[in-house]
Structure formats: C-alpha cells, structure tokens
Image: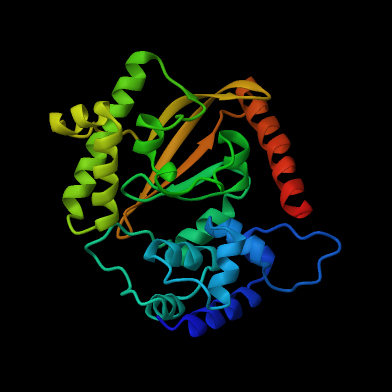
Amino acid sequence: MDHSEFGTTLRRLRDHVAPSAVGVPIGPRRRATGLRREELAGLAGISADYLTRLEQGRATSPSAQVVEALVRALRVSDAERELLYALAGHATPGADVVPTRIPPSVQRLLDRLADTPVAVLDAAGNLLVANLPYDALMGPVGALRGHERNTAWRHLVGPGSRALHTPAEQAAFEENVVAGLRATAARYPLDRQLQQLVRDLRAASPRFVALWESAAAPAVEHASRQKTILHPTVGPIRIDCDTLVVGPEDLRIMAYTAEPGTPDAERLALAIVLGTQELVDERVGH
C-alpha cells in the first residue's frame, strides 16, 4: 500500500464533498466547504484519530471493510472506488463476496425517503447505512462497530433492538435470521468476513449453533410486516416494516411507516422530531 498516496486521495475526496450532499447538517459558523475529519469518521463508523492517521500516511493498511465504509460515506464514483481499493492494496470486491456497494440509484431513493426511518442491510444482515429518522426511532447506530452491526450477532449475542417480541415471535425471528445467514453463506462461500462472523457466532452463542445445525430453510418473508417499537420517550409504536430487495447488489432496504391519522402515526412523527433534533444538535455541536 502507498500510505501517502492513499491519504492524499482520501483527503482530496473529503475536501470536495459538500456536507449537504451526504446529509451532514451545517452550523451557522461553518467555514469548511468540504467534510471535516470528524464528520467523515462518523459517517464511515471509524474514529477521527484513525482517519487522521490514514490521511497522514501513518496508519497501517486499512481493511477492505474500512475502505468500503469510506467509499460509501464519500459517495465516490466507481472509478474512484477502484482507485481507493488499489491504493489500499486490495482488489475491488467481486461476485464471490457479499456485496456492500450502494449504487447511485439506490442512494437517490434513500435521499427521497429522508423523512422516513430507513436502513440498508447487506445479504448477511450487516447494517450498512441508516438515516437520522431511523436513528431517532431505533437508537443511534453510528457507534456500532464490527459484529455489533450484524442482525444475528445483535439478537443472539448482543442487546437486541427496540422491537418487542413475544417469546414465540422471538424464537421464530431468530430461526429465520440464522437460516437466512446460512443461505447467504452458501451463496458466497469465499467471503472471509462472513466465514469469520459464523465462527464467532458459533463460539459465542449455543443458540446459534443449534439453529445453524438444524439446517432449517428460511421462512418466506412477506414484503410488509408489523412491528411494535418501544421508544424510550414516546412509548410503544405499532408500525409497518417494508423490505425492498435490490437485485444485483443483494441489498435489503427497510422502511418504517405507520398508518396515517392513527395514534401510532402521531407517536412515530413525535419520535422522529424529538430524536432527530437531538442527533442534529449533537452533530452540529461537534
């Protein structure tokens, strides 16, 4: 890896990204025309110190996952993506690994859903991006690192989510998550990151081992299903969760809405307003 060239290219790209183009709020005293280091670090889910060392050529080779996170945060072109991968000493991911690339057409769709809680997951259940309304509803995800961003890990090893389930619903949910992960592993048998996730899940969760070895097939998922979200400020909210699968990229776009004119719609709107304002104040304050 050419540390200095990677850092120079990364810094150039950061300086030429308008904050408004990537959803970063602009405070009244802002002077920088591009993204600040801490802003890009937050969008990419890495520390500002690590980003500084990358830009200054003092860090060791970033992983392919870090490169993809930076690519996604900067919304670079395909050519610039390939350049960053090459400068980092990696081959651009091919068809044998779980896709994490969010194409421009999908990004435009996400931008048009700016007032709706939306998250994008890859085929392995890793959370790639989430907007401010999603953070306001489900809790901030920017601080999640590594396996914490994976659905199976979060529910079988970690703290779960704000979604409420009966014991039977929880059991069915876990079975389907593991079955889906098994199917993904079969489609991408050469993905080393996915292989490591499975090994770590097997070591950390007896429940995962039992479900994995049961070899159950994934249940047929409905395009829309209802959930109850227990929000810490406004209480329980009954919402619809619609999932759109993006074909070639094998992505899952999850959008959360409530029926207009209902108390749940009012609670959802309140949760988004209160939570989004808190998150914006935090980001502008930094």
The quadrant holding residue 64 is bottom left
Q: Is residue 173 above or below residue 245?
A: above
- Residue at 66% x, 37% y is 272
Q: Residue furthest top?
A: 167
Quadrant, the N terminus? bottom left
Q: Residue at left 67%, top 26%? A: 266
Image quadrant holding the C terminus, namely bottom right
Residue 68 placed where, x, y %? 43, 65
The count of marks equals 0
Task: Decide if residue 114 is on the left or right side of residue 148.
Answer: right
Q: How is the image coloured?
A: rainbow
Q: Identify the residue at the far right of this view.
A: 29
Q: Is residue 225 above or below residue 37?
A: above
Where is residue 232 shown, x and y percent of the image?
64, 24
Res 192 quadrant in image: bottom left
In this picture, residue 152 sits left or right of residue 274: left
Q: 195 or 252: which is nearer to us?
A: 195
The residue closer to the viewer here, 151 or 192, is 192
Residue 123 placement (x, y as % from top left): 31, 49
Measured as percent of width and height from the top left, residue 47 is found at: 57, 58
Tell me which residue sits at (73%, 41%) in the image: 278
